[in-house]
Amino acid sequence: MTLLEAEMIENAGKPLDMNIEEGDEVVFVTDTSMDPQMWQVVLKAARSRGIDPTVTMRSELEHSHEEPPEPIQQAMMEADVIVFLTEKTMVHSHAAIEAMKGGTKGVALEEITPEIITGSAASADYEAILEHSRSVREVFTEGERLTITTPLGMDLEAEIGGRPGFSAVGKVEKQPGDIEIYAASFPDGEVAVAPIEETVNGTIIWDTTMNDINRIDEPIEVDVEEGYVTEIRGGAEADQLRRILENADRDSWGIGEIAVGLNPDVELQGSIRVDKKALGYLHIALGENTDVGGKLDADIHFDGVIGNATMKIDDTLITKDGEMQI
């Protein structure tokens, strides 16, 4: 065993230790596009802990959160813990949501690479992030109005009153209110809210990373009216997003989630799995949010990351020019 493999196995075991209990039925879901080394590393970490998961493999996902085949859906419904190890994300798929409604934990290791699993974000102090997340989540939950601006010209407002904040910090835990998602990621660290859809208005400028697009070279700018994207501007990445949305349903054009990253050890890698967790970076998602207290029942859930943002909830500054204020 090489030193690199040993480090990957050690870090891959951290989310297993946080979320799998003795006697749990564990299902791995991977796909043909995922680097086989990665699911095999996580499998070795599991077996070293006496965990013998069922490993399922599906064909390549056409887009993030595409529904799995029926046999995999059945395996997911019967599991106590699902470990997602696909090349694109699956945790907001309808099949995953249904499983989590029944109490199944979701552990999202989607999109991981050797660089991610051995990177600084995987070695963060997750207990400290958990404590930080609870205070930030309280502000999100008690807040009424949210605003975001950036030096690039982003200017967005939304109402959030009555929509509880929720957190993802490596360990699956019950969320406030009617939040149905019962999942965590690794690496992890964020607090988010599903805004009241029809109150979201303004301009969003994604400038860092996005699902299925990865690193953004030319910012993607969109206009939002009453919760839905009405116009998309930019370069090649904007064209790619437009093509994705034109092949999706109406609710995929809606603003489903607004979040702030809390992991102080993230180094940006051009991967949505890591970048959206970076301390002080925001991400705003298009599409599915019924699992996090919203009303958008969509084909997709796409996160896009934003740097150098100033976010304010009522009179409380959350970030200022990308720096955490609470």
Image: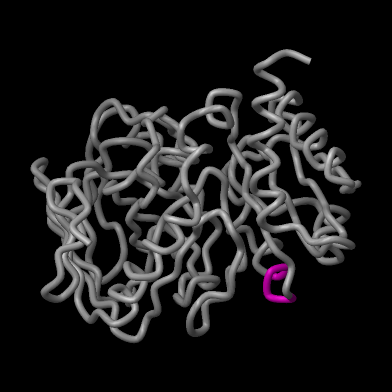
Q: In which quarter of the image is residue 149?
A: bottom left
Residue at 76% across, 57% down: 20
Question: Is residue 115 toward the left or the right of residue 225 in the image?
Answer: right
Q: Position of residue 248 (x, y in %)?
A: 50, 53
Question: Is residue 280 toward the left or the right of residue 252 in the image?
Answer: left
Q: Position of residue 26 (x, y in %)?
A: 83, 55
Residue at 40% across, 69% down: 134
Q: Where is residue 36 in the image (x, y as percent from the top left)?
A: 76, 26
Question: Is residue 226 toward the left or the right of residue 125 in the image?
Answer: left
Q: Position of residue 117 (x, y in %)?
A: 58, 31
Q: In which quarter of the image is residue 46?
A: top right
Q: Quadrant of residue 213?
A: top left
Q: How many marks?
A: 0
Residue at 34% across, 86% down: 162
Q: Where does the magenta region start and end?
A: 98-102
Question: Is residue 178 toward the left or the right of residue 34 in the image?
Answer: left
In this view, the residue in front, 229 or 183, is 183
Image quarter (top left, top right, bottom left or bottom right) of the C terminus: bottom left
Q: Report if residue 21 is visible in the image.
A: yes
